[in-house]
Amino acid sequence: MLVIRLQRTGRKNQPSYRMVVAEKSRPVKKKHIEVVGSYNPSEGKKITFKKDRIDYWISVGAQPSDTVAGLLKFNGMKDMEKYMKPRNKKRPVKNPSEEELAAMEAANAPTEDKSAEENSADEETSS
């Protein structure tokens, strides 16, 4: 399977990335098929890419990674949402609502009843 992903280049503490088309099973820093763009977060998040080549590789079956899809969507490419994982920015709730409490109690209740029934059955057989 082909993927469009970022390949890190640049010096220590000065990252820059190539946007490459590569086989998914290959290591990230090894051989790639084609360089289709670049991304430099150090220079004001500068991104350049070859839209026609990315469209071609997607039509052939390559899938952009989640990060690449987000960058491309932000820079004007359409239909990148289907390649992005859903993002849930909500924090976990510390105080669960009444419905969640009822669901948790319902899930825990049958296990408690079964253990109580087993204990009473054990007492009857031991007597």
Image (cartoon, grey):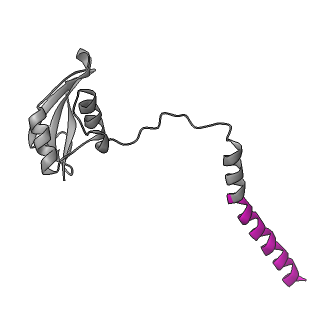
Mostly what secondary structure, the magenta segment?
Answer: helix
Where in the figure is residue 94, as x and y percent of width and height?
65, 36
Of all residues, the one furthest to the top in this rendering is 43
Determine the image quadrant of residue 71: top left
**Viewer-side residue, 115 vs 75:** 75
Residue 31 in sight here: no
Where in the figure is residue 72, as x and y percent of width and height?
23, 32
Kindly identify the residue that appears in the image at 85 percent across and 75 percent down: 120
Kindly identify the residue that appears in the image at 13 percent across and 40 percent down: 55
Magenta-span inclusion, residue 111: yes
Range of residues picked out in magenta: 107-127
Where in the figure is residue 50, as x and y percent of width and height?
11, 31
Magenta-span inclusion, residue 36: no
Determine the image quadrant of residue 8: top left
- Residue 118 falls left or right of residue 55: right
Residue 102 in sight here: yes
Where in the figure is residue 91, as x and y percent of width and height?
55, 34
Kindly identify the residue that appears in the image at 23 percent across and 15 percent down: 43
